[in-house]
Image (cartoon, grey):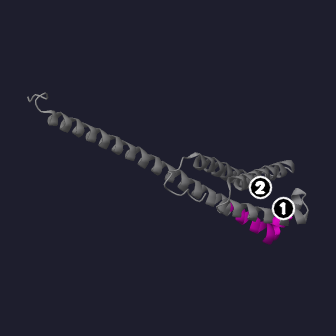
Amino acid sequence: MESTQQKPDLVAAKTSSKAKTTSKAKTTSKAKTSSKAETSSKAKTIVYWIVTALFCLQMSFTAYAQLRLPQVAEAFTHLGFPAYFRVELSWAKFLGVGLMLAPVPARLKEWAYAGFAITLASALIAHLSVGDGPEAWGWAAATGVLWALSYFCWRRVQATPRAPDRAPPAV
């Protein structure tokens, strides 16, 4: 064993070597943590967009059907709604879908989610109040589940911290 008192350069070299090793370990640990967080963030974003795309497809289809299909117009009459309400509701759905898919401020997305929640709850209430069976209100219930999943995922994506050197995802 060498004496460190006689060779101060040896002490400096050993200390420097330990500091470099510790620094490399910390950097590697931070990189692994950052990589895991980034992967988790990407996974949340991907799940959000898949669920939201399915929800928006469903809402777009129902809006189109309300405007174009005569049997849907008859269903609105059966529920006791006037014809103009069907048209207004369709255009409001198209507007909401546009807001959900566009990179708009979070407050506008919140309003779109609130509007869809009211629409879906109202659809369930309307079908149940006239005594319709699950074949009529089942679609509204299933779309409500998609709405809830989309909203939950959106809130998780919003709560995910973003790396300062990267631009935020268009959500």
Residue 51 occupies quadrant: bottom right
Which amino acid lies under the numbered mark 1 shown in the image of this protein?
Answer: Ala
Q: Secondary structure at mark 2?
A: helix
The residue depicted at 58 percent of the width and 58 percent of the height is 49
Can you give x and y, in whole percent of width and height, for residue 116 in the image? 75, 54
Can you give x and y, in whole percent of width and height, for residue 85 in the image? 87, 62
Which amino acid lies under the numbered mark 2 shown in the image of this protein?
Answer: Ala
Can you give x and y, in whole percent of width and height, for residue 19 in the image? 27, 38
The residue depicted at 84 percent of the width and 66 percent of the height is 87
Can you give x and y, in whole percent of width and height, for residue 108 in the image? 72, 56
10 horizontally vs 35: left or right: left
Quadrant of the image containing the C terminus? bottom right
Question: To which residue does mark 2 refer?
Answer: 136
Q: Relative to residue 7, is residue 128 depicted above or below? A: below
Question: To which residue does mark 1 refer?
Answer: 75
Q: Relative to residue 60, is residue 141 depicted above or below? A: above
Residue 45 within the segment the image draws in magenta: no
Answer whether labels 2 and 1 touch (C-beta < 8 Å): yes
Question: Which residues fall within the magenta stretch?
Answer: 58-74
Quadrant of the image containing the N terminus? top left
Q: Relative to residue 71, is residue 80 depicted above or below? A: above
Most common secondary structure along the magenta stretch:
helix
Q: Secondary structure at mark 1?
A: helix
**Separation of residues labelled 2 and 1 (CA atoms):** 9 Å
